[in-house]
Image (spheres, rainbow, N blue to C red):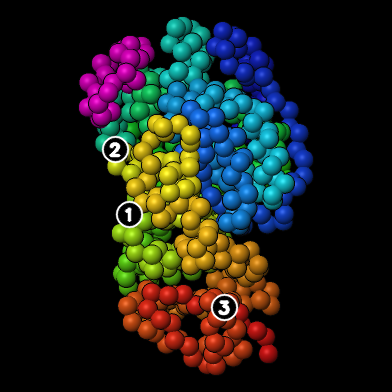
């Protein structure tokens, strides 16, 4: 049905006026086989905020060339893929989710040529690149929205959602999501929920799930769907390896009660997954906070972030026995298509791990092991692997500071980076962490290497799990390969039963046990179970 509607609308799309200064040209599919290793999308990813990763030109802002310069570091760590927060042109010039041009690079980050070079160099190192795609909404500065404001009879008008009298009862995260463009609500400097109420009858009331600065697309309009299809193909044709689809449960709202995760939104999500995976070897992961497990199903998105499990991992690392059990139960039921993480760029997922665990490196390592050795696709947040701390600031700013490359910072030659540097950079920086064999970086590197070298840890089933207080053990099984993992979150030693022919994988210096082993406090043990 969706494809039929799109086809009937192509002529209309091509007839749209050029005044909006946006590229709406059709983009034919040019699928090519992936050059990346098989199962690359089941390796460990890193989420990268390009603005905060590496500045290459001294303007105090990270950019694509800077990221390309750091690919050897990422290869050394062992990651198989990178998820880039939005790198397309935006009006916020920060987080990037207020998109103003879907087919161009944010000027502060570089050019399309820089993007192409990043793809080439990443692929040389066996690293895939996945890009954030903001499908639900655009910036208020997006040229079609500006044209829609100028002329209510414009064909651009139907690209967005308008209602002269939306009525009462709407409440999205404590705010009324309808805004009167005549009042220029995007200029409001306070909280969105404190905006003056819209007056019914105004002809310019529009819908914005995330605020007036980001008006929602009218995803019932097949011309809009076609535009997103073509824009996705634009990047896939350049060699992009997949997408993280932003806020997909919000694509369609039916009324004040039925606005979240509607059937129409799910149908569109599956439609876009099919488009992306029509390119061989590509990866798709969705942000769907309400029903993440459902979106992880191949019949919907085929990959989704495991929201809420991240909270249990951190609580378990702090010694919460109930969280250890919840974590084990989750993995028992979880689809291997889920994407696991400790936190991401949004503060609602938690502070940086260093801050959540108050700098306790032993517990930090347990948290890392609790997702790097488990089913799913793990996503490490940039700086997590070196124990980078957050900074002071409002909203999400504490999570989005420059990467600590050296004790002095190493992010930029500019004396004023776009945001404060982490205060713990003197010891927790990439340079010193790589030199220290016992560092967090080398712990992450060792676990990632162990995962890469083992089909059981990469692709295997989760079996034979057991929780005894603060001790969690389980097996990962793929074909004839079987690996046993035991994690002791407690402050006292714990004994575990071992099958015959258990051989230590971590730590490598551990003595080969017989039928029982002692797991020291706050520690990890990994064994390969050899067949008789």
Asked if 486 appears above or below 56 in the picture, the reply is below
Asked if 326 appears above or below 141 in the picture, the reply is below
Look at 27% across and 23% down and name the residue there. 189
Q: Which residue is disc 2 drawn over?
A: 394
Asked if 145 appears above or below 500 in the picture, the reply is above
Q: Which mark is residue 355?
A: 1
Q: Which residues are magenta?
A: 179-204
Q: Secondary structure at mark 1?
A: helix
Q: Nearer the viewer, mark 2 or mark 3?
A: 3
Q: Is residue 187 magenta?
A: yes
**358 left or right, relative to 71:** left
Q: Position of residue 29 (x, y in %)?
A: 73, 32
Rendered image quadrant of residue 113: top right
Q: Are marks 1 and 3 in contact (CB under 8 Å)?
A: no
Q: Is residue 265 magenta?
A: no
Look at 57% across and 40% down and name the residue there. 67
- Give the mark nearest the N terminus, 2 or 3: 2
Q: Position of residue 417 (x, y in %)?
A: 42, 33
* Residue 356 in view, yes or no: yes
Q: Residues within 10 Å of mark 1 (few under 14, many from 20)?
A: some
* Residue 295 in view, yes or no: no
State the CA–CA distance, disc 1 to disc 2: 15 Å
Asked if 300 appears above or below 222 in the picture, the reply is below
State the CA–CA distance, disc 1 to disc 3: 30 Å
Q: Residues within 10 Å of mark 3 (few under 14, many from 20)?
A: few
Q: Position of residue 137 (x, y in %)?
A: 46, 28
Q: Which residue is disc 3 drawn over?
A: 508
């Amino acid at each position: 049905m969706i494809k039929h509607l799109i086809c009937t609308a192509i002529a209309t799309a091509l007839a749209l006026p050029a005044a909006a200064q946006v590229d709406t040209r059709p983009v034919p599919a040019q699928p090519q086989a992936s050059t990346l290793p098989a199962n690359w999308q089941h390796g460990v990813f890193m989420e990268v905020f390009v603005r905060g990763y590496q500045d290459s030109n001294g303007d105090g802002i990270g950019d694509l060339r800077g990221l390309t310069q750091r690919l050897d570091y990422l290869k050394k760590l062992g990651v198989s893929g990178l998820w880039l927060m939005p790198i397309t042109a935006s009006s916020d010039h920060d987080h990037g989710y207020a998109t103003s041009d879907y087919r161009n690079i944010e000027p502060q980050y570089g050019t399309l040529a820089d993007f192409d070079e990043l793809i080439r160099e990443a692929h040389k190192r066996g690293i895939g690149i996945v890009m954030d795609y903001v499908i639900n909404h655009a910036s208020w500065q997006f040229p079609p929205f500006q044209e829609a404001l100028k002329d209510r009879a414009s064909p651009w008008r139907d690209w967005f959602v308008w209602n002269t009298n939306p009525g009462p009862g709407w409440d999205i995260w404590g705010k009324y999501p309808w805004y009167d463009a005549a009042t220029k609500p995007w200029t409001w400097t306070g909280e969105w929920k404190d905006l003056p109420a819209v007056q019914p009858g105004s002809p310019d009331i529009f819908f914005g799930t995330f605020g007036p600065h980001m008006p929602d697309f009218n995803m019932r309009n097949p011309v809009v769907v076609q535009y997103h299809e073509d824009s996705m193909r634009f990047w896939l044709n350049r060699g992009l390896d997949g997408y993280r689809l932003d806020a997909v449960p919000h694509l369609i709202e039916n009324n004040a009660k039925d606005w979240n995760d509607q059937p129409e939104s799910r149908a569109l999500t599956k439609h876009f997954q099919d488009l992306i995976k029509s390119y061989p070897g590509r990866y798709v992961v969705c942000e769907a906070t309400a029903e993440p497990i459902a979106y992880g199903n191949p019949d919907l998105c085929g990959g989704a972030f495991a929201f809420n499990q991240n909270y249990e991992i951190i609580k378990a690392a702090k010694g919460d026995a109930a969280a250890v059990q919840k974590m084990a139960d989750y993995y028992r039921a979880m689809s291997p298509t889920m994407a696991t993480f400790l936190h991401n760029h949004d503060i609602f997922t938690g502070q940086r791990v260093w801050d959540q665990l108050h700098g306790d490196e032993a517990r930090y390592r347990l948290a890392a092991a609790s997702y790097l050795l488990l089913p799913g696709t793990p996503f490490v947040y940039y700086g997590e692997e070196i124990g980078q701390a957050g900074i002071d600031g409002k909203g999400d700013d504490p999570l989005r500071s420059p990467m600590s490359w050296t004790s002095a910072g190493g992010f930029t030659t500019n004396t004023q980076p776009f945001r404060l540097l982490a205060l713990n950079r003197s010891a927790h920086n990439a340079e010193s962490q790589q030199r220290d064999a016992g560092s967090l970086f080398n712990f992450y590197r060792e676990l990632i290497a162990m995962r890469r070298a083992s089909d059981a840890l990469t692709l295997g089933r989760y079996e034979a799990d057991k929780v005894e207080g603060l001790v969690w053990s389980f097996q990962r099984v793929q074909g004839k390969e079987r690996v046993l993992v035991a994690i002791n979150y407690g402050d006292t030693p714990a004994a575990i039963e071992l099958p015959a022919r258990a051989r230590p994988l971590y730590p490598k210096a551990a003595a080969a046990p017989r039928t029982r082993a002692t797991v020291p406090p706050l520690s990890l043990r990994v064994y390969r179970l050899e067949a008789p």
